Amino acid sequence: MVEKGILVKQYYIKKPHVLYVNTNQGMKIIKKYRYENTINRNFQFIQALKQHGFNATINFEPFSDGEVVIKTRGEVWGIMPYLQTKSPVSYEQSHHRKRVIELLHSYHETAAFAWYDVKDIFPMYELTHVWQKRLASFIHHNKLIESIIGKRTYKVIEELCQNSLVTMHKYEHEGQKHQHTIIHGDTASHNFLRGVNNDYYLIDFDCAAQSTFFTDYIQLAQRFLLQEDFSIEKLLKEEGMSNLFHLPYFAAALRFPAMLLLPWYIRLTSISPSYKELIQLKQWTEKQAIKAELTNREILRIFPNI
């Protein structure tokens, strides 16, 4: 990075693709990407967000030549400032959830305007299509999965998925009435940071795409529901989320155990998933399948027409 004017004093590997680096320009984070376009696209989008007034995020830093990509040994990297943070955001804590929802609201208010500036560089994202793909992989490997979690648990998960998708298709036309925007695409807690001043930041737009705004909230609600002792009843009381239940599509989507399928999809579509990895999923899957059943019953009780 010397040719870019950056001298590395010290670094440590946070993840295989993420480095924390102490440089002559201060602490930085350097992240490796598969495609150069992802870095350039995210940089343009975050610039647009900031131009429209959303500053609670972190962008890549351009070099003196205007480039935002480091190319070395056939790899592409982006560099951004390091943000000193407090303890990680946890969806188990109500005040963290409140701040995350507020920040996501603020983001979407701005993204609705930034969308016009960048819509041509982002792919479309159709939630039902993505979930159908994950379910197809789950069904394709049914013999292997049944041998690990048992036929009953497998059947419960598949039926929950199928029933939810049928209902989502029923109300899909209502969802399509809403204008597309740029969704964040990955509302996991690690993509929300708490600065030392207690300001919250939304980071990592690698999964950003064009879709309707409530796609982010469906994913966020499902992550909330993963927490111990969290329920639909509690979600209805969550300020900033309860108003979304007027959309039948939103309630129908919460019946789909997406967070349960996701780790299976990741492992089953990897190059060589180990049997040990799959076995480690067994206990968690059995527990979450029971909770998914209870969530499904609760939704049908509260919203009998869904």
Image (cartoon, helix red, strand yellow):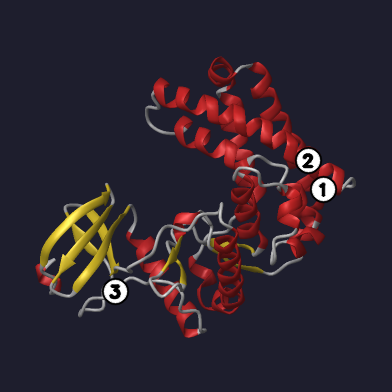
Q: Which mark is residue 61?
A: 3
Q: Tell me the element at label 2.
A: helix
Does 146 appear above or below 49? above
Task: Give amino acid for label 3.
Answer: Glu
> Are the two marked residues, 1 and 2, in contact with CB atoms closer than 8 angstroms?
yes
Q: Quadrant of residue 298?
A: top right
Horizontally, is 71 left or right of 249 in the view?
left
Q: Where is residue 10 in the image (x, y as percent from the top left)?
A: 12, 60
Which residue, given by chain and number where applicable, does mark 1 sit on? 170
Q: Position of residue 97 (x, y in %)?
A: 58, 60
Q: Tell me the element at label 1.
A: helix
Q: Tell me the element at label 3.
A: loop
Horizontally, is 304 left or right of 129 in the view?
right
Q: How packed is label 1: few (under 14 Cα within 10 Å), some, or many (20 or more)?
A: some
Quadrant where the N terminus sits is: bottom left
Which residue, given by chain and number where applicable, does mark 2 sit on? 166
Is residue 162 visible in the rendered structure shown here? Answer: yes
Q: Distance between the residues labelled 1 and 2?
A: 6 Å
Q: Where is residue 273 in the image (x, y as percent from the top left)?
A: 40, 27
Please report the residue visible at 15 percent of the width from the left and 69 percent of the height from the top. 23
